[in-house]
Amino acid sequence: MTKIAVFPGSFDPITLGHVSLVKRAAPLFDKVIVAIGVNSLKKGMFPIEKRKIWIENVFKEIGNIEVATYSGLTIDYCKQVGAKYILRGLRTAADFEFERGIGQVNHMMEESIETVFFLTEAKHTPIASSIVRDVYKNGGDVSKLVPPEVEL
């Protein structure tokens, strides 16, 4: 059986914290799908096509990482692609409380799919896409927060 993990998110934009998590997860799974969620009620700052290209460029040298877009429930997308694992990053205790609830509901919906939590590396703990967007909108330098493939 192929071990497939889905790492869902908006990645608006992808940050160094996201990159670290995916690179650390890649050796543990046969395939990691970085899945950009499309929410029709939410307008991202950066076009989804651009985000997808950035992420593909970040991971182009790692053969078992794919990038995709999806809409609807993450658990349904996992079933669609045959993934048995959902990857989530934890920066803070608040992240844990939020993610635990989602993970428990996902498990109630589909017992065969497990949520796997990765602790963020300490140096990436303060980095969040919302912070990157705010710094960018206000003319700040985001080069220490996002991978060089993210051309803002």
Image (tube, helix red, strand yellow):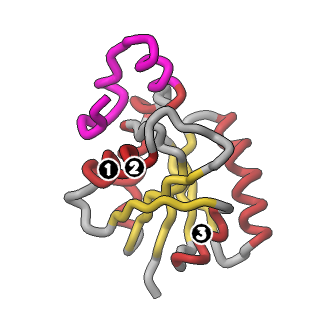
Task: Determine which residue is flagged by label 3.
Answer: 77
Any magenta on residue 113?
Answer: no
Q: Position of residue 33 (x, y in %)?
A: 43, 64
Give the position of the C terminus as an image quadrant. Answer: top left
Q: Is residue 140 visible?
A: yes
* Left or right for 92, reference 19: right
Predominant secondary structure in magenta? loop
Q: Position of residue 135 (x, y in %)?
A: 44, 17
Indicate whether 60 appears above or below 50: below
Label 2 is placed on what type of residue? Glu
Q: Nearer the viewer, residue 89 or 134?
A: 134
Q: Quadrant of residue 138?
A: top left
State the residue position of label 2: 49
Helix, strand or loop at label 2? It is helix
Viewer-nearest residue: 60 or 138: 138
Residue drawn at x 25%, y 67% is: 63
**In the image, residue 115 above or below residue 84:** above
C-alpha span from label 2 to label 1:
6 Å
Q: Which residues are magenta?
A: 131-152
Q: Are marks 2 and 1 in contact (CB under 8 Å)?
A: yes
Judge left or right: residue 109 versus residue 36: right
Crowding at mark 3 (Cα within 10 Å: few <14, some 14-19, many 20+): some
Q: Secondary structure at mark 3?
A: helix
Q: Which disc number belongs to residue 53?
A: 1
Q: Nearer the viewer, mark 3 or mark 2?
A: 2
Q: Which one is earlier in the sequence, the residue at label 3 or at label 2?
A: 2
Using the numbered discs, state the Cα–Cα distance from disc 3 to disc 1 in whole angstroms: 20 Å
Image position of 112 with respect to 132: above or below: below
